[in-house]
Image (spheres, rainbow, N blue to C red):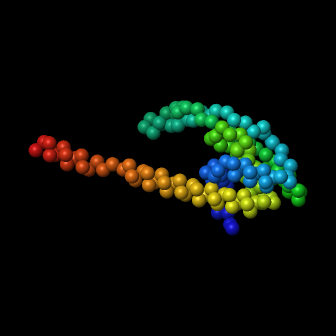
Amino acid sequence: MMNDIPRSQWLRMWQASEPARIKALAKEVSAACTITDLHIPKAGLGLLQLRDSALGDAYFLGEIPVTKAHVRIHSPNGKVAEGAAICMDDRVGLTRAMAILDGVLAAQLPGWERVEHSLQEGAGQVQADTALRRANLSATKVDFSLLSTLDEDEHA
């Protein structure tokens, strides 16, 4: 299996997966490894800043939950890798698990094939979610062309 998903999209794929499976996989592939937290995993709030499309002014839409984890992984074969994750979520354990998966897959540490498989499963879920959103959007589409014919009939 060849990983064609860019690393910048890995977290998105794992977030589409079942959280318990992601945590279990991270625990499984890192069981023989030594994991060091380079930064203490933490949760907090971030301000979501947007830019007004008409005037270009920046404004804050509100606060969003943010979690962050950065780990160093020492594998039994002597390889050392780092993994990190920043997520719009409040589950620190899940974010740390994704940081571990990130490091294992990026450095192809033992167990990386299972991590890559989970990435592909997540990609399938993202595709299914996207198809469902598109179907829901097309089902709620409104045809405004009928309104113009009603106005013409009333004025006649």
Question: In the figure, 49 relative to 111: above or below?
Answer: above
Say which quarter of the image contains residue 49: top right
The quadrant in which the C terminus is found is top left
Percent coordinates x, y for residue 68 in the rendering: 71, 40
Horizontal side of residue 54 vs 64, given as left or right:
left
Who's the residue at 81% across and 42% down the image?
A: 37
Closest to the observer: 38 or 14? 14
Question: In the figure, 42 relative to 28: above or below?
Answer: above
The answer to whether residue 103 shows anywhere in this view is no
Question: In the figure, 39 relative to 23: above or below?
Answer: above
Who's the residue at 74% across and 62% down the image?
A: 113
Furthest toward the bottom, the residue is: 1
The quadrant in which the N terminus is found is bottom right
Percent coordinates x, y for residue 155 in the rendering: 13, 42
Percent coordinates x, y for residue 54 in the rendering: 43, 37
Who's the residue at 22% across and 47% down the image?
A: 148
The answer to whether residue 126 shows anywhere in this view is yes
Say which quarter of the image contains residue 127: bottom right
Percent coordinates x, y for residue 35 in the rendering: 83, 47
Who's the residue at 40% across and 53% down the image?
A: 138
